[in-house]
Image (cartoon, rainbow, N blue to C red):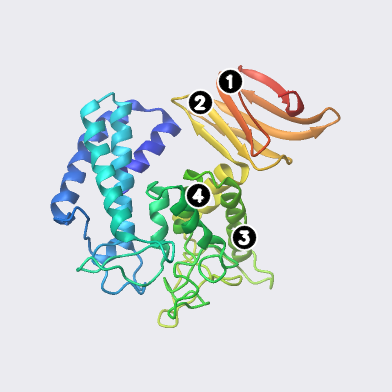
Amino acid sequence: PLFAWAEFNLYHKSANKRRVKEIMPVLQKYMEWVDQTYKQPNGLYSAPFSASTMFNSPRQNTYYAVDFNSAMAINCAHMSALGDILNDKEISFQYKRAYFSLKTRINSMMWDSNSGFYYDLDKNEQKLSQKTIAGFWPLLAEIPNADRADALIDHLSNPCTFGTDHPFPTLSADSPNFNENGEGFCGGVYPAFNFMVIKGLEKYQHYELARECAIRHLYFILEGLQPANGKKGDMYEAYKPCKEGHAVMESDPKYPKQRYLQTVGLSTIALMIENVIGLSISLPRKTVDWIIPNLEIMGIEKLSLKRNLITILSNKSVRGWEIQMESEKLYYFTINILDQKKKTLPIPSGKCSMLIDKL
């Protein structure tokens, strides 16, 4: 249930308010159907295990899945945001209330303070013991407070749990079911789930860790595409967590799927623009935010923003660090050099440049 989240992101890439207006009745019907079908008396959702797509993950006895419930919270929050876009206060309030209700239940029932993690629940509402990638969905839903988020995010740098060489395994490395060859969701690294975790890190302003993990993930994808041994490579559905190469599964010689661009595209194109370069763009707001941990030579040329091509490049010249920009229309540019400088400026159409030292 991530349609509202997708529509919200599409709106900021296209500024198509008409689409939001047309799609809203469909999204509302969908949310009603999910409520009628899966919502339980305790306020949590119990959906079929297949909804997680984690087909062989050791999550036996899961009745209330942390990922499905977090995804529902994400959807409710963005249904409310879409209501704000349409200036519909009733929709906005209805789904905001649903979001906070679900957030409260996930926090009170699924969080374990001893291990600093969110867990699935069984039918008796008892927490299960396996730490899986599903436990990071609450980050994207902005469910944990700052202290809980820090405890959860610590796992992403801990080699004993999720801080493996190739971030992030779908099962904690300290699980008895963990397999260094991937073996599906018993340790395999899946690009779509990495995208989810990195976007969750963004929500809590952990930009440097998000960037570092995106770069490491890209390295392993590139190595799989062009292996060092000279053999023919490809883009895969899943990768090994502790070394180069695609994941393997003893029972399925056809695993993983090759040329799996629908999720590898997220890890390559989207993460490269949004996390490695660090650009965040909103067409309706006419804003471009550039968040970078430190200055280096990089940028993007001729990025298409709805019939407007923009170029933003940073270079070191004799005058110091300089950002060169070119656009066909006016927009507002925010540069955020972490722990150093943050400045928002209107950028006129045509070519212009700014010296960082002068900001």
Q: Which amino acid is tagged 4?
A: Leu
Residue pictured at 56% horizontal, 51% vertical: 210
- Residues at circles 4 and 2 in contact by the CB criterion of under 8 Å: no
Disc 1 target residue: 328
Disc 2 target residue: 307
Marks 1 and 4, the one that precedes in the sequence: 4
Q: Give neighbour class at mark 1: few <14, some 14-19, many 20+ (Cα, 10 Å).
A: some
Q: Which amino acid is tagged 2?
A: Arg
Quadrant that contains the C terminus = top right
Question: Which picture quadrant has residue 125?
Answer: bottom left
Q: Nearer the viewer, mark 2 or mark 3?
A: 3
Disc 2 from disc 3: Cα separation: 31 Å
Q: Which amino acid is tagged 3?
A: Leu
Q: Which amino acid is tagged 1?
A: Glu
Disc 1 on helix, strand or loop? Answer: loop
Q: Nearer the viewer, mark 4 or mark 2?
A: 4
62 relative position to 141: left or right: left
Between 303 and 3, the one lying in front of the other is: 3
Q: Is residue 67 above or below residue 27?
A: below
Q: Position of residue 243 (x, y in %)?
A: 60, 72
Disc 3 from disc 4: Cα separation: 23 Å
Disc 2 on helix, strand or loop? Answer: loop
Disc 3 from disc 1: Cα separation: 34 Å
Marks 3 and 4, the one that precedes in the sequence: 4
Disc 3 target residue: 222
Marks 1 and 2, the one that precedes in the sequence: 2
Disc 1 from disc 2: Cα separation: 9 Å
Disc 4 target residue: 201
156 relative position to 342: left or right: left
Disc 1 from disc 4: Cα separation: 33 Å
Residue pictured at 33% horizontal, 39% vertical: 78
